[in-house]
Image (tube, grey):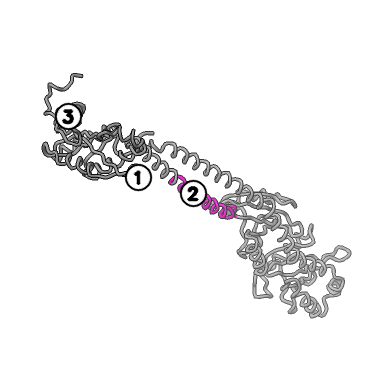
Amino acid sequence: MSGPLSRYRLAIIVALLLLAGIIVNAGLYYQQGSQDIRHGIVEQGLPLTGDTIFSEIDKSILRPLSVASLMANDTFLQDWLKDGERDPSRAARYLAAINGRYGITGSFLVSENSRRYYYAGGVLKTVKPTDPEDRWYFHSLQVAQSDAYDIALDEDMTNGGKTTLFINHRIVDSQGKLLGVIGVGLPQAELSAQLAAHERRFQRRIYFIDHDGRIVLDSAGAGQRKLRDLPGLAQLADAILAGGLEPRKLEYSRDGNRYLLTSRLLPELGWHLLVEQNETRALQPLHAALQVNLAINSTILLLVLIAVLATLQHHQRRMRQLATTDPLTGCLNRLAFLELLPGWLRACERASAEPQLLMIDIDHFKQVNDKHGHQIGDQVLREIADLLRSQLRGGDLLIRWGGEEFVVLVHSHGDDDALAERLRSIVANHMMSASGKRLTVTISIGLCQWLPPETLEAAVARADLALYAAKQGGRNRVCHAQPYHPLDEPIA
């Protein structure tokens, strides 16, 4: 990694590792959560719903089935049929007494001898093999060869043609002679409404299919559809129909959603009870929780990263400051000066100015240290640096050259010593406090114009000679350096 980001390499690596950890942790959380939800649906939710529905079916369908069985074995009814069906009103009253119990609305009786269709209102009609509306009766006779009853959906002509679930039970006397078919009707709409209530309660789809794979009862109350005609379920039809009393666990996909399904046989009805749940929808709260978890952790990571980067930048600025600034006086050190010098010279050239170099030394600084101590000496250095800095412009450079020596680089337009004199004067007139006593110090300055092609070393050397001359001349003064002569520059 190179460029501006290289300074933050460690922070970026740590952030990426933390982000990877967050993603891996979220993935494991989602995987475990989805497994728990799936296990809860398959092993607990769907079977418990099936048991509950089975119990409700016991009330809604199996009890009417028991009523139909009791009616078929009622000796009064059998004797009445054998006795020539005299006084049809007796059968009508008998059937009317059944209606209203356990949700039954369409009790009926068909005599095999007379083929009359009795209901609570009397005789409705005579059933005929050629009448399409009467096929159910003759079908019941055929099915009844092995079973005592069959269950079918049909229109109840005695109740406005409403679709009704009929339980058709054979009436057989003690000698095994077929006397007719008696049964009860349960309105499909009421059964569908019960299933719809259960579906809202359990948030699962519930429906029943017969031995041919037709949906005979669901919450929609729609016409009979076959599993083999339904997307997703078609491939499970054989497995569902082959299932027994024990719940069978299946799954399928449709329209981008995954469904979990349990199927069990209800032998009393000859139907299969199917309970299914949309696993994709059940996982939506987990998806939402995962997104919130990722958002929170990512936000925390971002805030931590911002804090780390801010702290890192602060420390880097501090390190750069320590590396480029004299910690005692706040002046540039030599390293920073040499880094800034090329740019400073270009700015000087753009301004058509000449670099002026001032070599400054504190007079008798050793005596200040010896007499007042190094702590006061440090104070003197700081105050003089502040005094010098107060007289410089924004583009001027103040460098602590070493010990009590400073170098000033300024833009000038000629051999002008006004700035040097101002610096010398402000220091000489400044009163300092040392150990409770008043203290004044002075400075000596060597001034030179630095003109190309003279090197920095040569200009410093000339300024240093001028500074030496100022010292020799009595200190607290400014001396100009000798003009630059290329032949005077040392050979490398």
Q: Earlier in the sequence, mark 1 or mark 2?
A: 2
Local packing at callout 3 (Cα closer than 10 Å; few below 14, some 14-19, many 20+) is: many
Q: Which of these two is toward me, 400 or 188?
A: 400
| Label 3 sits on residue | 469
Q: Quadrant of residue 411?
A: top left
Q: Is residue 450 left or right of residue 46?
A: left
Image position, residue 408 (x, y; %)? 22, 37
In the displayed image of the protein, which residue is found farthest to the top? Answer: 491
Taking the magenta stretch, the answer to whether it contains residue 478 is no
Image mark for residue 300: 2
| Label 1 sits on residue | 436
- Between the C-alphas of marks 1 and 2, the distance is 55 Å
Taking the magenta stretch, the answer to whether it contains residue 282 is yes
Image mark for residue 248: none
Identify which residue is drawn at 22% across, 40% down.
396
Residues rendered magenta in the picture: 278-306
Q: Amino acid at mark 1?
A: Gly
| Magenta stretch: helix, strand or loop mostly | helix
